[in-house]
Amino acid sequence: MKTIEEIFVKTWLDEVDVEAIKEWAYIFIDRNDDIPQEVFELLEAKKYDYENLILNTASVLNEYFSPQSLNNEILAAKYLVAVATDYLNDETTPMDVCRVITNIDTHFIDAPRDLPDNIAYYPIWLGNLYNSCDWCDETWTDNSAPHLKQDIESQLPLINEWIENHSP
């Protein structure tokens, strides 16, 4: 079973998988005696309410939950590896992988990492992928953006190394 943090990261970065969210909620309800109201709210929510509801649920279940935590960044990196691998295997589009890359850049830039005030955090493991996706839209194909596959192939080993070095 996926954790609420894994579901949050996928929802935050890419898409709302209503069925996976409801499945998680039903399993949580079945396995626990003390069930916060927020879990029940996941069963009846509208698609566009899920991001906030999952954030609230994760916060209720874990008082130390932070969207920009290192743990969630590791989950985001793992999710990007999965999406990028799908892209390299021609199972998804440039727009799909670029949406995730852009959202990682947006959500984790300036994450609290105990840096001096004059230094902003950037998920360095992204390398130049954000720039590789510059101007990406639905019209991009492998033929019109060959650099994207090359850049992803070059960056994936570095992302995997970063995950390995930062995972508990």
Image (cartoon, rainbow, N blue to C red):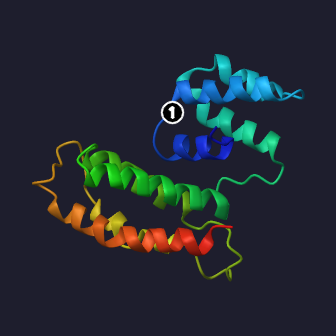
Would residue 32 appear left or right of 136 to someone viewing this image? right
Q: Position of residue 114 (x, y in %)?
A: 71, 76
Residue at (84% x, 29% y) in the render: 32
Q: Farthest residue in the right direction? A: 34
Which image quarter holds the N terminus? top right
Q: Position of residue 136 (x, y in %)?
A: 25, 52
Q: Farthest residue in the top direction? A: 44
Q: Vertical placement of 148 versus 12: above or below? A: below
Q: Vertical placement of 110 versus 138: above or below? A: below
Would residue 104 appear left or right of 52 to someone viewing this image? left
The residue lying toward the viewer, choosing from 28 and 121, is 28
Q: Position of residue 156 (x, y in %)?
A: 38, 67
Would residue 65 appear left or right of 110 to someone viewing this image? right
The number of numbered badges drawn on the structure is 1
Residue at (27% x, 43% y) in the render: 91
Q: Farthest residue in the left direction? A: 143
The residue lying toward the viewer, choosing from 31 and 58, is 31
- Determine crowd level at label 1: few under 14, some 14-19, many 20+ residues with C-alpha closer than 10 A: some
Residue at (28% x, 65% y) in the render: 132
Disc 1 target residue: 16
Q: Can residue 122 be spotted in the picture?
A: no
Q: Secondary structure at mark 1?
A: loop
Q: Position of residue 30 (x, y in %)?
A: 77, 23
Which image quarter holds the C terminus? bottom right
The residue lying toward the viewer, choosing from 24 and 107, is 24
Residue at (47% x, 68% y) in the render: 160
Would residue 146 appear left or right of 121 to someone viewing this image? left
Q: Vertical placement of 67 versus 25: above or below? A: below
Which image quadrant is residue 72 in?
bottom right
Residue type indicated by callout 1: Val
Q: Can residue 118 be spotted in the picture?
A: yes
